[in-house]
Image: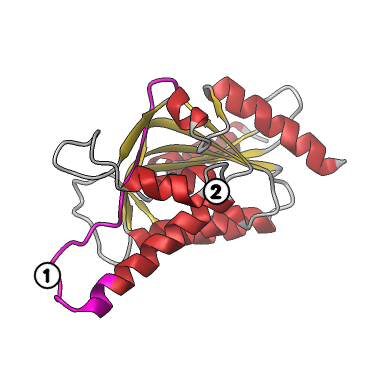
Amino acid sequence: MGKKESSELEEKKDAKINEYGQVVLENNRKHKKIQLMTIIGEIEGHDVLPPTSKSTKYEHILPQLAAIEDNDDIGGVLFLINTVGGDVSAGLALAEMIASMSKPTVSLVLGDSHSIGVPLAVSTDYSFIAPSATMIVHPVRMNGVIIGAPQTFDYFKLIQDRIVKFISIHSKVQKEELEAMMINTGILTKDLGTILVGQEAVDKGLINCVGGISHAFGKLMELMEDNND
């Protein structure tokens, strides 16, 4: 490859990082190709967020995940997560997509993984959380004008049940314990929910292990080798 072609390739890689927060990692000792994906800011759904907001657009991530699943050169996917939550429908769609991938997947929570970020963090084959990172489990929020009818509350309860079921299936937390954390009144001032910091998320069974990028990278390599056996 000539200098011009190499320079153009690097420019394309940089553009992908800037635009989508993704890059292929392939300079490791075993020359395995790992797709790095970032889920940061707010999960943008059917409503477009202001350009000043950091966001993860699910309509961008879904086709990218499909392309990764279709690419035999990619051996595994590493997700770096730092999100305050966002659109419930979009976040759950992303979590379901990640959970359905045949390639090995590992997530690393850095900073925060709040609200709908919880299903995203547990959707991978194995999960890590940084020692100072936090996770917040709380009930589904009711924003905007709420119609005072039983059907409205039944609908929100249905959404919450979907989230609880997904988390309980993809983690070690029982449904009843998760619901208890959601309605806890003793941690969040003037609000419901539970904050878990680092090891606490592991102790509760949400996350597999406390660690950093080297731990997440090593575990993914291990899963990739097992997947090839």
User: Which quadrant would the N terminus be assigned to in this image?
Assistant: top right
Magenta residue check for 214: no
Residue 145, numbered label: 1
Give left or right: position of 224 versus 65: right
Q: Is residue 70 above or below residue 156?
A: above
Residue 123, numbered label: 2
Label 1: how many residues lie within 10 Å, few (<14), some (14-19) or many (20+)? few
Of the pair 170 and 80, the residue shown nearer to us: 170
**Residue 213 x %, y %:** 54, 24
The kind of residue on which mark 1 rests is: Val
Magenta residue check for 140: yes
Give left or right: position of 152 versus 126: left
Residue at 71% over, 31% down: 221
**Residue 123 x %, y %:** 55, 48
Residue at 57% over, 49% down: 170
Q: Secondary structure at mark 1?
A: loop
**Residue 210 x %, y %:** 52, 23
Magenta residues span 130-153
Circle nearer the N terminus (2, 1): 2
